[in-house]
Image: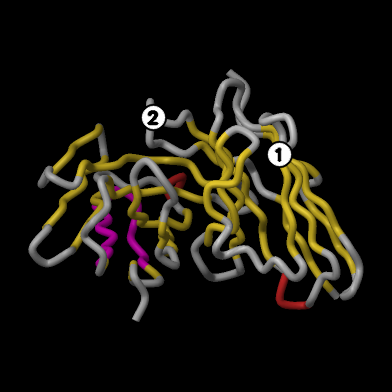
Amino acid sequence: GEDVEQSLFLSVREGDSSVINCTYTDSSSTYLYWYKQEPGAGLQLLTYIFSNMDMKQDQRLTVLLNKKDKHLSLRIADTQTGDSAIYFCARGGYSTLTFGKGTMLLVSP
Amino acid sequence: EAGVAQSPRYKIIEKRQSVAFWCNPISGHATLYWYQQILGQGPKLLIQFQNNGVVDDSQLPKDRFSAERLKGVDSTLKIQPAKLEDSAVYLCASTVPGQGHEQFFGPGTRLTVL
């Protein structure tokens, strides 16, 4: 199987919370990341978590890391239509990044 | 601070032709990466430079792909000859080695091989 796996699609209504999930097999990475990619654009780093942390909150974003289950999640509170994009989970550190295939988030009004 | 610059933004070629992409990283970023992102997938590393030296090119198809960063600043990635399966977005990223782990990505070059 893939090293980093994500569900492919998530649809929510504006104002709801979105939760995007990711699992990984290699636990040697220093950091785990969430990137956002809008159509025709490069990747924008949203947030990251150090591998020895369990949770990180940054405004509307909450990252949860379950090291035992090798599971990472990104919660977006009060999701807006501008949050519609592809979200990539990645693992890495002071070297190359290994990405999942991305989760397309569609936010409907 | 200017971001990572890439050109061209779009390129359409026929198979067996050659193509080159250019990347100018953020000023002062010594580490530069080229990624290939095929439609529907996440980016995959092709090559990593630190200054003008290659750190990792294990995933670069060296029979047709080449990359250089002669002066340790901007970089070019070349494909010769192109195949249909090379159709993808080629992303460049940069970071400051030893001081940061965050990679900053350019907008990418979308290559279509017909």
Q: Chain of mark 2?
A: B
Q: Residue at x 24, y 45 (%)?
A: A77
User: Can you say whether B4 is above or below A88 in the image?
Assistant: above
Q: Residue at x 84, y 65 (%)?
A: B80
Tell me the crowding category of disc 1: few under 14, some 14 to 19, or many 20 or more residues within 10 angstroms, Cα based: some
Q: Quadrant of the C terminus of chain B?
A: bottom right
x, y percent for residue A59: 25, 32
Answer yes or no: is residue A16 visible.
Answer: no
User: Can you say whether A1 is above or below A96 in the image?
Assistant: below
Q: Residue at x 29, y 60 (%)?
A: A20
- Specify the amino acid type for callout 1: Arg
The residue carrying mark 2 is B98
Report the magenta residues as a range: A10-23
Q: Residue at x 26, y 63 (%)?
A: A21
Q: Quadrant of residue B101?
A: top left
Q: Is residue B76 magenta?
A: no
What number is the disc on residue B69? 1
Answer yes or no: is residue A17 visible.
Answer: yes
x, y percent for residue A105: 41, 60
x, y percent for residue A96: 44, 50
* Residue nearest the viewer, comparing B52 with A36: B52
